[in-house]
Image: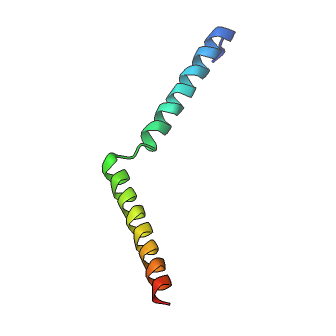
Amino acid sequence: MIYGHNEADVALDQKRHEVNERLARETRIGWPILIVAVVLVVGGAVMVAYLFLNAGIGR
């Protein structure tokens, strides 16, 4: 297909928009997964801090 200058711009914009929509859809994570990840990270940080403090006090 041979596009005119304006038609080529419209086609490229549409293709770019489709790619952006697909990336947004594929990289979207839900709130439950995000909450679980935050709880695990915070829980791990608290455990590490507790172990370091407990080891420091024990000496």
**Rendered location of residue 6, percent (x, y):** 64, 9
Residue at 50 percent across and 29 percent down: it is 18
**Rendered location of residue 49, percent (x, y):** 45, 72
Using residue 13 as the reference point, say whether residue 35 is left or right of it. left
Vertical order, 37 against 26 (above or below): below
Residue at 52 percent across and 32 percent down: it is 20
Q: Residue furthest right?
A: 5
Q: Nearer the viewer, residue 15 or 24?
A: 24
Using residue 31 as the reference point, say whether residue 3 is left or right of it. right
The answer to which quarter of the image holds residue 26 is: top left
Using residue 59 as the reference point, say whether residue 50 is left or right of it. left
**Rendered location of residue 32, percent (x, y):** 30, 51
**Rendered location of residue 8, percent (x, y):** 64, 16
Instruction: Count the marks.
Output: 0
Q: Residue furthest bottom?
A: 59
Q: Which color scheme does this rendered protein use?
A: rainbow
Residue at 63 percent across and 15 percent down: it is 9
The answer to which quarter of the image holds residue 3 is: top right
Q: Nearer the viewer, residue 31 or 6?
A: 31
Vertical order, 57 against 5 (above or below): below
Vertical order, 40 against 51 (above or below): above
Q: Quadrant of the N terminus?
A: top right
